[in-house]
Structure formats: C-alpha cells, structure tokens
Amino acid sequence: MKRRQLLAGAVVGLAAALAADGAEASDATTLAMLEEFAAAWNRHDVDGLMACMAPECAFETAAGKDVNGTRHVGRDAVRRAYAAVFETYADARWNHPAHFVAGDRAVSEWTFTGTTKDGTKVEMNGCDIFTLQGGKIALKNSYRKQRG
C-alpha cells in the first residue's frame, strides 16, 4: 500500500475507534477524513472512497428524475455509483476542496472538471452536504451549478 493510503486508513480507523467508544469524532478528525475523501476522488480510488462511508450509507446525486436526484442506498449501490462517475469522466477532478463541520453534518465545496467520452468538457462549482455517523459519511448529498 502507498504511504498516503496507510495514513488515510489510520485517520478513518481513528474516527471509527472514537465512535465505537461512544465519543463523537472531533472536528479535526472529521476534517481529515473529508480531506482523504476528496483525495480519493482525485485518485479515482473507489476503495478509498468507501473507507470513508458508514456501514449503512447512501449517495444522492445532483441529477436525476426524483426531487433528490438519483438515490443510491447501501454500500454496493454507492460503490457502483462512484465507479460510474469515473467511467463517465476518465479525467475527473474535484479541484480546490474546502470543508467545514457542524456537529453530525459537514459540507465540502469544490470545482469539478472532466471530459466525457464524446469529448465534451465540463466545469462547474458544487458541494456535498454530508450526514455523519460514527466518524464516517452516512449520506453524501451532492449539488452543483448547471450551466445553461
């Protein structure tokens, strides 16, 4: 394993240990986990992403036919949805991530860039609103600007 992945595993493991002891993860621990989550997106590392997700997790996409976008529930569904992003945008990047934590909620802001298979370039600002559980992400709810 790479050193960065080992460090990320230690951060996520520390958050889980704190939660298991009945203590909420500190804001600093949560911010470190969110930094690792952002880094995993930019590495296209689905395993790294899933290491940051709670056992019972969900992902609500920015687009979809429902009011909450498309909702993926459960680890297998979330994993497939994350992998699909990398299939759609082989060069996907979430640039300039910034995070803040408020209790069991957190936000990450970013600028997404990517190119679709047909060569269409995409650039947009967006954010994720997270619900946290046991030091991990239970819900990733994504929002983005839509250019028209």
Image: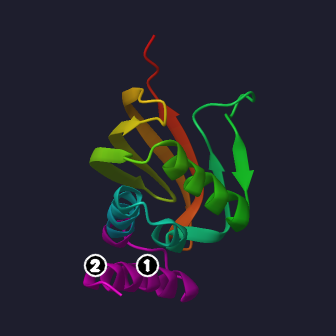
Horizontal arrangement in the rendering, residue 33 relative to residue 135 (left or right): left
Secondary structure type for disc 1: helix
Q: Which residue is mark 1?
A: 12
Classify residue 41 by image quadrant. Answer: bottom left
Question: Height in image: 19 above or below 48?
Answer: below
The residue located at (39%, 55%) in the rendering is 101
| In-front residue for pair 22/95 | 95
Q: Point out residue 54 in the picture as x, y percentages from the top left corner.
A: 60, 70
Is 65 on the left-hand or right-hand side of 28? right
Of all residues, the one furthest to the top in this rendering is: 148
Residue that carries the numbered disc 2 in the rendered image = 4
- Residue 130 point in image, percent of width and height: 52, 52
Cα distance in 3D space between marks 1 and 2: 12 Å
Circle 1 Cα neighbour tier, 10 Å, few/some/many (<14 / 14–19 / ≥20) = many
Q: Secondary structure at mark 2?
A: helix
Judge whether 29 appears above or below 73 on screen.
Answer: below
Residue 124, given in percent of the width and then of the height, sits at 37, 29
Residue 44 position (above or below residue 144): below
Q: Which residues are magenta?
A: 1-30
- Magenta segment includes 15: yes
Q: Residue at x 50, y 45 (%)?
A: 129
